[in-house]
Amino acid sequence: MTEHSPFPFASSDVEKRDNGRVLTSLDTNGVPDFRADFPGLVTADGAPWHYLDTAATAQKPQVVIDATVRAMGADYATVHRGVYARSADMTLAFEAARVRVARFLNAASTAEIVFVRGATEGINLVANSWGGANLKPGDRILLSCLEHHSNIVPWQLIAERTGAAIDVVPLTPDGKIDLDAMAAMIRPEHKLVALAHVSNVLGSPLDVARAARIAHDAGALLLVDGCQAAPRMKIDVQALGCDFYLFSGHKLYGPTGIGVLWARGDILAAMPPWQGGGSMIDTVTFEKTTYAPAPTRFEAGTPAIVETIGLAAAIDYVEAIGLDAIAAHEASLVRQAREALRGVNSVRLLGPDDACGIVSFVMEGVHPHDIGTILDESGPDGSGVAIRAGHHCAQPLMRHLGVEATARASFGIYNDESDVAALIRGLERVRTIFG
Ligand code: PMP
Protein backbone atom coordinates (compact mmCIF):
# COMPACT_ATOMS: atom_id res chain seq x y z
CA MET A 1 0.00 0.00 0.00
CA THR A 2 1.37 3.45 -0.88
CA GLU A 3 0.22 6.89 0.20
CA HIS A 4 -1.17 7.47 -3.28
CA SER A 5 -3.22 4.32 -3.79
CA PRO A 6 -4.77 3.59 -0.44
CA PHE A 7 -7.30 1.13 -1.81
CA PRO A 8 -5.28 -1.72 -3.25
CA PHE A 9 -7.94 -4.06 -4.58
CA ALA A 10 -7.16 -7.40 -6.07
CA SER A 11 -8.81 -7.47 -9.49
CA SER A 12 -11.13 -10.22 -8.23
CA ASP A 13 -12.38 -7.78 -5.57
CA VAL A 14 -13.18 -5.24 -8.23
CA GLU A 15 -14.97 -7.88 -10.30
CA LYS A 16 -16.94 -8.97 -7.27
CA ARG A 17 -17.91 -5.38 -6.67
CA ASP A 18 -18.91 -4.87 -10.31
CA ASN A 19 -20.94 -8.06 -10.37
CA GLY A 20 -22.66 -7.25 -7.11
CA ARG A 21 -24.53 -4.23 -5.92
CA VAL A 22 -21.51 -1.97 -5.79
CA LEU A 23 -20.60 -0.39 -9.09
CA THR A 24 -17.42 1.61 -8.85
CA SER A 25 -15.91 3.07 -12.00
CA LEU A 26 -12.30 2.30 -12.76
CA ASP A 27 -10.00 5.15 -13.71
CA THR A 28 -7.61 4.86 -16.65
CA ASN A 29 -5.09 2.97 -14.50
CA GLY A 30 -7.68 0.43 -13.44
CA VAL A 31 -7.77 1.80 -9.88
CA PRO A 32 -11.23 2.18 -8.31
CA ASP A 33 -12.28 5.80 -8.69
CA PHE A 34 -14.54 6.45 -5.74
CA ARG A 35 -15.15 10.08 -6.71
CA ALA A 36 -16.97 8.87 -9.82
CA ASP A 37 -19.50 7.06 -7.63
CA PHE A 38 -20.64 10.36 -6.11
CA PRO A 39 -22.65 12.65 -8.40
CA GLY A 40 -22.58 15.39 -5.74
CA LEU A 41 -18.85 15.91 -6.02
CA VAL A 42 -18.89 18.37 -8.91
CA THR A 43 -19.74 22.07 -8.81
CA ALA A 44 -22.54 23.64 -10.88
CA ASP A 45 -19.87 24.43 -13.52
CA GLY A 46 -18.78 20.81 -13.67
CA ALA A 47 -15.48 21.43 -11.85
CA PRO A 48 -14.36 18.96 -9.16
CA TRP A 49 -15.63 20.04 -5.76
CA HIS A 50 -13.19 19.63 -2.87
CA TYR A 51 -15.73 18.46 -0.31
CA LEU A 52 -14.14 18.37 3.15
CA ASP A 53 -17.31 18.36 5.26
CA THR A 54 -18.08 14.66 5.51
CA ALA A 55 -18.20 14.86 9.32
CA ALA A 56 -21.32 17.04 8.91
CA THR A 57 -22.85 14.76 6.31
CA ALA A 58 -21.42 12.44 3.66
CA GLN A 59 -22.08 12.68 -0.06
CA LYS A 60 -24.12 9.75 -1.44
CA PRO A 61 -22.86 7.15 -3.90
CA GLN A 62 -25.05 6.45 -6.93
CA VAL A 63 -25.90 2.96 -5.61
CA VAL A 64 -27.55 4.53 -2.56
CA ILE A 65 -29.43 7.06 -4.68
CA ASP A 66 -30.59 4.25 -7.01
CA ALA A 67 -31.70 2.08 -4.09
CA THR A 68 -33.80 4.89 -2.60
CA VAL A 69 -35.33 5.80 -5.98
CA ARG A 70 -36.32 2.16 -6.48
CA ALA A 71 -37.68 1.90 -2.95
CA MET A 72 -39.71 5.08 -3.41
CA GLY A 73 -40.86 4.09 -6.91
CA ALA A 74 -41.26 0.60 -8.35
CA ASP A 75 -40.86 -1.21 -5.02
CA TYR A 76 -42.79 1.18 -2.78
CA ALA A 77 -45.36 -0.07 -0.28
CA THR A 78 -45.82 -0.02 3.48
CA VAL A 79 -44.15 -2.55 5.77
CA HIS A 80 -45.31 -4.93 8.50
CA ARG A 81 -49.04 -4.71 7.78
CA GLY A 82 -49.84 -5.16 4.09
CA VAL A 83 -51.48 -8.43 3.03
CA TYR A 84 -50.48 -7.95 -0.60
CA ALA A 85 -47.27 -9.21 -2.18
CA ARG A 86 -45.59 -5.80 -2.70
CA SER A 87 -45.90 -4.99 0.98
CA ALA A 88 -44.62 -8.43 1.97
CA ASP A 89 -41.60 -7.91 -0.32
CA MET A 90 -40.96 -4.46 1.13
CA THR A 91 -41.21 -5.89 4.64
CA LEU A 92 -38.59 -8.50 3.73
CA ALA A 93 -36.29 -5.80 2.34
CA PHE A 94 -36.84 -3.61 5.40
CA GLU A 95 -36.06 -6.42 7.83
CA ALA A 96 -33.10 -7.49 5.67
CA ALA A 97 -31.72 -4.00 6.35
CA ARG A 98 -31.90 -4.77 10.08
CA VAL A 99 -29.93 -7.97 9.48
CA ARG A 100 -27.36 -5.94 7.51
CA VAL A 101 -27.00 -3.41 10.35
CA ALA A 102 -26.71 -6.19 12.97
CA ARG A 103 -23.88 -7.76 10.95
CA PHE A 104 -22.24 -4.37 10.38
CA LEU A 105 -22.03 -3.83 14.16
CA ASN A 106 -21.52 -7.52 15.02
CA ALA A 107 -24.61 -7.39 17.24
CA ALA A 108 -25.61 -10.66 18.91
CA SER A 109 -29.15 -10.40 17.49
CA THR A 110 -31.30 -8.30 15.15
CA ALA A 111 -33.57 -7.73 18.17
CA GLU A 112 -30.85 -5.38 19.46
CA ILE A 113 -31.18 -3.03 16.46
CA VAL A 114 -33.63 -0.14 16.79
CA PHE A 115 -34.18 2.11 13.78
CA VAL A 116 -34.37 5.77 14.79
CA ARG A 117 -34.31 9.05 12.86
CA GLY A 118 -30.67 9.61 13.72
CA ALA A 119 -28.18 9.55 16.58
CA THR A 120 -29.91 12.53 18.20
CA GLU A 121 -33.21 10.68 18.41
CA GLY A 122 -31.43 7.51 19.59
CA ILE A 123 -29.75 9.30 22.51
CA ASN A 124 -33.06 10.94 23.43
CA LEU A 125 -34.66 7.49 23.34
CA VAL A 126 -32.10 6.05 25.78
CA ALA A 127 -32.25 9.13 28.04
CA ASN A 128 -36.05 9.05 28.21
CA SER A 129 -36.67 5.31 28.30
CA TRP A 130 -33.67 3.92 30.21
CA GLY A 131 -32.96 7.18 32.07
CA GLY A 132 -36.60 7.79 32.97
CA ALA A 133 -36.91 4.28 34.41
CA ASN A 134 -33.54 4.05 36.16
CA LEU A 135 -32.33 7.49 37.29
CA LYS A 136 -33.34 8.98 40.64
CA PRO A 137 -32.22 11.87 42.87
CA GLY A 138 -28.62 11.35 43.93
CA ASP A 139 -27.68 9.42 40.77
CA ARG A 140 -25.07 10.88 38.44
CA ILE A 141 -24.33 10.77 34.70
CA LEU A 142 -20.78 11.05 33.39
CA LEU A 143 -20.11 12.86 30.09
CA SER A 144 -16.90 14.22 28.58
CA CYS A 145 -15.81 17.74 27.78
CA LEU A 146 -15.75 17.07 24.02
CA GLU A 147 -19.32 15.79 23.55
CA HIS A 148 -21.63 16.97 20.77
CA HIS A 149 -24.69 18.83 22.10
CA SER A 150 -26.70 15.72 21.11
CA ASN A 151 -24.84 13.81 23.81
CA ILE A 152 -25.21 16.57 26.42
CA VAL A 153 -28.67 18.16 26.20
CA PRO A 154 -30.78 14.94 26.35
CA TRP A 155 -28.94 14.07 29.57
CA GLN A 156 -29.54 17.54 31.01
CA LEU A 157 -33.25 17.22 30.23
CA ILE A 158 -33.57 13.80 31.90
CA ALA A 159 -31.37 14.90 34.82
CA GLU A 160 -33.76 17.80 35.45
CA ARG A 161 -36.74 15.45 35.37
CA THR A 162 -35.25 12.74 37.60
CA GLY A 163 -33.09 14.77 39.99
CA ALA A 164 -29.86 13.20 38.71
CA ALA A 165 -26.68 15.27 38.27
CA ILE A 166 -24.01 15.45 35.56
CA ASP A 167 -20.21 15.28 35.86
CA VAL A 168 -17.69 15.94 33.13
CA VAL A 169 -14.53 13.95 32.33
CA PRO A 170 -11.66 16.29 31.33
CA LEU A 171 -9.42 15.91 28.27
CA THR A 172 -5.74 15.07 27.88
CA PRO A 173 -3.51 17.90 26.56
CA ASP A 174 -3.84 16.54 23.00
CA GLY A 175 -7.64 16.52 23.18
CA LYS A 176 -8.61 12.95 24.02
CA ILE A 177 -11.06 11.89 26.73
CA ASP A 178 -8.81 11.36 29.77
CA LEU A 179 -9.60 7.79 30.87
CA ASP A 180 -7.18 7.96 33.82
CA ALA A 181 -9.16 10.95 35.09
CA MET A 182 -12.41 9.06 34.42
CA ALA A 183 -11.17 6.07 36.44
CA ALA A 184 -10.24 8.39 39.29
CA MET A 185 -13.53 10.29 39.40
CA ILE A 186 -16.15 7.57 38.74
CA ARG A 187 -18.23 6.56 41.78
CA PRO A 188 -21.09 4.15 42.51
CA GLU A 189 -23.52 7.08 42.08
CA HIS A 190 -22.63 7.17 38.37
CA LYS A 191 -25.27 5.05 36.65
CA LEU A 192 -24.40 5.88 33.06
CA VAL A 193 -21.37 7.13 31.13
CA ALA A 194 -21.96 8.63 27.65
CA LEU A 195 -18.93 9.29 25.42
CA ALA A 196 -18.10 9.93 21.77
CA HIS A 197 -16.16 7.18 20.00
CA VAL A 198 -14.57 9.85 17.77
CA SER A 199 -14.82 13.59 18.45
CA ASN A 200 -16.65 15.48 15.69
CA VAL A 201 -14.36 18.48 16.28
CA LEU A 202 -10.91 17.03 17.01
CA GLY A 203 -11.18 13.55 15.52
CA SER A 204 -9.92 12.16 18.87
CA PRO A 205 -10.49 8.40 19.10
CA LEU A 206 -11.67 6.79 22.33
CA ASP A 207 -10.44 3.46 23.68
CA VAL A 208 -14.01 2.20 24.10
CA ALA A 209 -13.05 -1.20 25.55
CA ARG A 210 -11.10 0.50 28.36
CA ALA A 211 -13.88 3.04 28.97
CA ALA A 212 -16.35 0.14 29.20
CA ARG A 213 -14.19 -1.67 31.77
CA ILE A 214 -13.90 1.48 33.90
CA ALA A 215 -17.66 2.11 33.69
CA HIS A 216 -18.60 -1.49 34.44
CA ASP A 217 -16.15 -1.78 37.36
CA ALA A 218 -18.05 1.13 38.95
CA GLY A 219 -21.44 -0.44 38.14
CA ALA A 220 -22.31 2.05 35.35
CA LEU A 221 -23.45 1.44 31.79
CA LEU A 222 -21.57 2.89 28.81
CA LEU A 223 -23.30 4.60 25.90
CA VAL A 224 -21.10 5.34 22.89
CA ASP A 225 -21.94 8.03 20.35
CA GLY A 226 -20.54 6.41 17.21
CA CYS A 227 -21.61 9.11 14.71
CA GLN A 228 -18.06 9.87 13.60
CA ALA A 229 -16.65 6.37 14.12
CA ALA A 230 -19.12 4.17 12.22
CA PRO A 231 -18.20 5.71 8.82
CA ARG A 232 -14.47 5.41 9.47
CA MET A 233 -13.61 2.16 11.27
CA LYS A 234 -14.81 -1.40 11.82
CA ILE A 235 -17.27 -1.48 14.72
CA ASP A 236 -17.74 -4.63 16.78
CA VAL A 237 -20.07 -3.81 19.65
CA GLN A 238 -19.41 -7.14 21.36
CA ALA A 239 -15.63 -6.64 21.32
CA LEU A 240 -16.02 -2.99 22.41
CA GLY A 241 -18.03 -4.14 25.44
CA CYS A 242 -20.27 -1.07 25.58
CA ASP A 243 -24.00 -1.17 26.37
CA PHE A 244 -25.45 1.29 23.84
CA TYR A 245 -24.03 2.35 20.46
CA LEU A 246 -25.49 4.91 18.07
CA PHE A 247 -24.88 6.30 14.61
CA SER A 248 -26.63 8.32 11.92
CA GLY A 249 -27.14 6.97 8.39
CA HIS A 250 -26.39 10.24 6.62
CA LYS A 251 -22.78 10.33 7.88
CA LEU A 252 -22.30 6.75 6.63
CA TYR A 253 -23.04 7.65 2.97
CA GLY A 254 -26.74 6.81 3.49
CA PRO A 255 -29.88 8.98 3.57
CA THR A 256 -30.92 11.47 6.23
CA GLY A 257 -33.81 10.55 8.53
CA ILE A 258 -32.45 7.13 9.48
CA GLY A 259 -30.10 6.11 12.27
CA VAL A 260 -29.40 3.16 14.48
CA LEU A 261 -29.51 2.51 18.20
CA TRP A 262 -27.88 -0.73 19.23
CA ALA A 263 -28.44 -1.79 22.84
CA ARG A 264 -27.43 -4.98 24.62
CA GLY A 265 -30.36 -7.39 24.44
CA ASP A 266 -31.05 -7.75 28.15
CA ILE A 267 -30.94 -3.99 28.70
CA LEU A 268 -33.20 -3.20 25.73
CA ALA A 269 -35.67 -5.92 26.71
CA ALA A 270 -36.12 -4.28 30.13
CA MET A 271 -36.58 -0.72 28.79
CA PRO A 272 -40.09 0.78 28.72
CA PRO A 273 -41.51 2.28 25.53
CA TRP A 274 -40.67 5.88 24.77
CA GLN A 275 -43.07 7.00 22.05
CA GLY A 276 -46.52 5.45 21.71
CA GLY A 277 -48.45 4.75 18.52
CA GLY A 278 -49.03 2.15 15.85
CA SER A 279 -46.75 -0.88 15.45
CA MET A 280 -45.22 -0.80 18.93
CA ILE A 281 -48.16 -2.49 20.67
CA ASP A 282 -49.30 -6.01 21.39
CA THR A 283 -52.94 -5.29 22.29
CA VAL A 284 -54.72 -1.98 22.90
CA THR A 285 -57.83 -1.42 24.99
CA PHE A 286 -58.91 1.74 26.78
CA GLU A 287 -58.24 -0.05 30.05
CA LYS A 288 -54.74 -1.34 29.34
CA THR A 289 -52.29 -1.53 26.47
CA THR A 290 -49.52 -4.09 26.24
CA TYR A 291 -46.41 -3.58 24.19
CA ALA A 292 -44.51 -5.49 21.53
CA PRO A 293 -41.08 -6.88 22.38
CA ALA A 294 -37.90 -4.99 21.44
CA PRO A 295 -37.02 -3.62 18.96
CA THR A 296 -40.62 -3.13 17.71
CA ARG A 297 -41.58 -1.58 21.07
CA PHE A 298 -39.31 1.36 20.23
CA GLU A 299 -40.46 1.89 16.64
CA ALA A 300 -43.84 3.62 16.90
CA GLY A 301 -45.51 4.69 13.68
CA THR A 302 -44.73 4.01 10.02
CA PRO A 303 -40.94 3.79 9.83
CA ALA A 304 -38.56 5.52 7.42
CA ILE A 305 -38.97 2.76 4.83
CA VAL A 306 -37.10 4.33 1.92
CA GLU A 307 -34.29 5.67 4.10
CA THR A 308 -33.78 2.28 5.76
CA ILE A 309 -33.39 0.60 2.36
CA GLY A 310 -30.93 3.36 1.45
CA LEU A 311 -28.95 2.73 4.64
CA ALA A 312 -28.64 -0.96 3.77
CA ALA A 313 -27.27 0.01 0.34
CA ALA A 314 -24.77 2.37 2.01
CA ILE A 315 -23.60 -0.40 4.34
CA ASP A 316 -23.13 -2.72 1.35
CA TYR A 317 -21.11 0.02 -0.34
CA VAL A 318 -18.70 0.69 2.54
CA GLU A 319 -18.35 -3.00 3.36
CA ALA A 320 -17.40 -3.79 -0.24
CA ILE A 321 -14.60 -1.21 0.06
CA GLY A 322 -13.72 -2.45 3.55
CA LEU A 323 -13.78 -0.44 6.78
CA ASP A 324 -10.10 -1.15 7.42
CA ALA A 325 -9.20 0.23 3.99
CA ILE A 326 -11.32 3.32 4.68
CA ALA A 327 -9.63 3.83 8.06
CA ALA A 328 -6.16 3.52 6.49
CA HIS A 329 -7.11 5.92 3.67
CA GLU A 330 -8.42 8.58 6.05
CA ALA A 331 -5.44 8.15 8.40
CA SER A 332 -3.15 8.85 5.46
CA LEU A 333 -5.12 11.99 4.51
CA VAL A 334 -5.09 13.23 8.11
CA ARG A 335 -1.30 12.73 8.22
CA GLN A 336 -0.86 14.64 4.96
CA ALA A 337 -3.18 17.45 6.08
CA ARG A 338 -1.63 17.89 9.52
CA GLU A 339 1.87 17.94 8.06
CA ALA A 340 0.89 20.50 5.40
CA LEU A 341 -1.05 22.67 7.86
CA ARG A 342 2.02 22.89 10.09
CA GLY A 343 3.70 24.70 7.19
CA VAL A 344 0.98 27.37 6.85
CA ASN A 345 1.89 30.59 8.62
CA SER A 346 0.00 31.19 11.93
CA VAL A 347 -2.14 28.06 11.79
CA ARG A 348 -2.73 26.40 15.17
CA LEU A 349 -3.54 22.72 14.80
CA LEU A 350 -5.97 21.20 17.29
CA GLY A 351 -6.51 17.58 18.30
CA PRO A 352 -4.23 14.55 18.43
CA ASP A 353 -1.91 13.34 15.67
CA ASP A 354 -3.84 10.05 15.44
CA ALA A 355 -7.13 11.91 14.81
CA CYS A 356 -9.68 9.89 12.81
CA GLY A 357 -10.71 11.55 9.55
CA ILE A 358 -11.06 15.06 11.03
CA VAL A 359 -8.64 18.00 11.36
CA SER A 360 -9.58 21.18 13.22
CA PHE A 361 -7.47 24.33 13.24
CA VAL A 362 -7.55 28.06 13.85
CA MET A 363 -5.59 30.81 12.10
CA GLU A 364 -4.32 33.79 14.03
CA GLY A 365 -6.23 36.97 13.18
CA VAL A 366 -8.76 35.29 10.87
CA HIS A 367 -12.23 34.17 11.94
CA PRO A 368 -13.00 30.56 10.89
CA HIS A 369 -16.09 31.81 9.02
CA ASP A 370 -13.84 34.00 6.84
CA ILE A 371 -11.58 31.02 6.20
CA GLY A 372 -14.60 28.96 5.15
CA THR A 373 -16.00 31.69 2.90
CA ILE A 374 -12.71 32.32 1.10
CA LEU A 375 -12.07 28.59 0.64
CA ASP A 376 -15.54 28.23 -0.88
CA GLU A 377 -14.75 30.75 -3.62
CA SER A 378 -13.23 29.26 -6.71
CA GLY A 379 -9.48 29.33 -6.50
CA PRO A 380 -7.08 29.68 -9.44
CA ASP A 381 -7.70 26.01 -10.31
CA GLY A 382 -11.42 26.72 -10.67
CA SER A 383 -12.60 24.57 -7.78
CA GLY A 384 -13.86 25.51 -4.35
CA VAL A 385 -13.12 23.83 -1.02
CA ALA A 386 -15.98 23.14 1.39
CA ILE A 387 -15.05 23.03 5.06
CA ARG A 388 -17.08 23.58 8.21
CA ALA A 389 -16.53 26.63 10.39
CA GLY A 390 -18.20 27.21 13.74
CA HIS A 391 -18.64 25.65 17.16
CA HIS A 392 -19.64 22.30 15.63
CA CYS A 393 -22.41 21.81 18.24
CA ALA A 394 -19.69 21.49 20.88
CA GLN A 395 -19.73 24.79 22.77
CA PRO A 396 -18.27 23.34 26.01
CA LEU A 397 -15.29 22.06 23.99
CA MET A 398 -14.83 25.50 22.34
CA ARG A 399 -14.70 27.06 25.81
CA HIS A 400 -12.15 24.46 26.89
CA LEU A 401 -10.00 25.19 23.81
CA GLY A 402 -10.29 28.94 24.43
CA VAL A 403 -11.76 29.64 20.99
CA GLU A 404 -15.18 30.71 19.71
CA ALA A 405 -15.03 28.51 16.68
CA THR A 406 -12.68 26.37 14.61
CA ALA A 407 -12.19 25.58 10.94
CA ARG A 408 -12.68 21.86 10.34
CA ALA A 409 -11.68 19.73 7.37
CA SER A 410 -13.11 16.20 7.42
CA PHE A 411 -12.46 13.39 4.99
CA GLY A 412 -14.42 10.62 3.33
CA ILE A 413 -13.69 7.74 0.98
CA TYR A 414 -13.85 10.04 -2.05
CA ASN A 415 -11.14 12.45 -0.88
CA ASP A 416 -7.52 12.25 -1.96
CA GLU A 417 -4.31 14.27 -1.87
CA SER A 418 -5.71 16.75 -4.43
CA ASP A 419 -8.27 17.84 -1.81
CA VAL A 420 -5.52 18.38 0.78
CA ALA A 421 -3.51 20.37 -1.79
CA ALA A 422 -6.58 22.52 -2.63
CA LEU A 423 -7.14 23.20 1.07
CA ILE A 424 -3.54 24.33 1.56
CA ARG A 425 -3.62 26.51 -1.61
CA GLY A 426 -6.83 28.09 -0.34
CA LEU A 427 -5.32 28.80 3.07
CA GLU A 428 -2.31 30.47 1.45
CA ARG A 429 -4.84 32.72 -0.33
CA VAL A 430 -6.53 33.47 3.02
CA ARG A 431 -3.11 34.39 4.46
CA THR A 432 -2.40 36.71 1.50
CA ILE A 433 -5.81 38.42 1.80
CA PHE A 434 -5.46 38.94 5.56
CA GLY A 435 -1.79 39.89 5.37
N1 PMP B 1 -22.77 13.12 17.73
C1 PMP B 1 -21.74 13.45 16.94
C2 PMP B 1 -20.34 13.14 17.39
C3 PMP B 1 -21.98 14.08 15.72
O1 PMP B 1 -20.96 14.42 14.93
C4 PMP B 1 -23.31 14.37 15.35
C5 PMP B 1 -23.62 15.07 14.05
N2 PMP B 1 -22.83 16.22 13.83
C6 PMP B 1 -24.34 13.97 16.20
C7 PMP B 1 -24.03 13.35 17.38
C8 PMP B 1 -25.78 14.20 15.85
O2 PMP B 1 -26.12 13.48 14.71
P1 PMP B 1 -27.51 13.74 13.96
O3 PMP B 1 -27.61 15.22 13.78
O4 PMP B 1 -27.36 13.01 12.67
O5 PMP B 1 -28.58 13.18 14.83
Image (cartoon, rainbow, N blue to C red):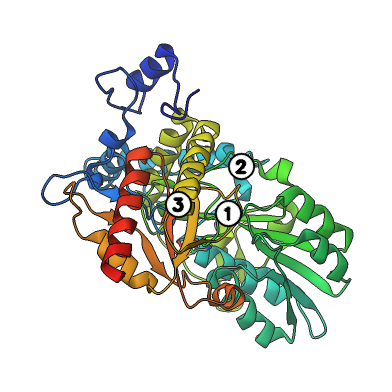
Q: Nearer the viewer, residue 54 or 97?
A: 54
Q: Which residue is mark 1?
A: 226
Q: Is mark 1 within 8 Å of ligand 1?
A: no
Q: Nearer the viewer, residue 341 or 318?
A: 341
Q: Residue at x 54, y 47 (%)?
A: 230
- First along the sequence among labels 2 and 3: 2
Q: CA distance from mark 2 to mark 3?
A: 34 Å
Q: Which residue is mark 3?
A: 343
Q: Mark 2: which secondary structure? A: loop
The amino acid on which the numbered mark 3 sits, given as a three-letter code, is Gly
Q: Could one spot residue 56 in this view of the protein?
A: yes
Q: Nearer the viewer, residue 401 or 249?
A: 401
Label 1: few (<14), some or many (≥20) within 10 Å? many
The amino acid on which the numbered mark 2 sits, given as a three-letter code, is Ile
Q: CA distance from mark 1 to mark 2?
A: 9 Å
- First along the sequence among labels 3 and 1: 1
Up-down relation of residue 185 to residue 292 (above or below): below
Q: Give coordinates of residue 128: x percent, y percent.
A: 62, 74
The amino acid on which the numbered mark 1 sits, given as a three-letter code, is Gly
Q: Kindly check if marks 1 and 2 are in contact, taking CB atoms under 8 A apart as contact.
A: yes
Q: Kindly check if marks 3 and 1 are in contact, taking CB atoms under 8 A apart as contact.
A: no
Q: Which residue is mark 2?
A: 235
Q: Is residue 95 left or right of residue 26?
A: right
Q: Residue at x 33, y 66 (%)?
A: 371
Q: Give coordinates of residue 310: x percent, y percent.
A: 36, 45
Q: Is residue 283 left or right of residue 172?
A: left
**From the image, which quarter does the C terminus lie in?**
bottom left
Q: Could one spot residue 416 in this view of the protein?
A: no
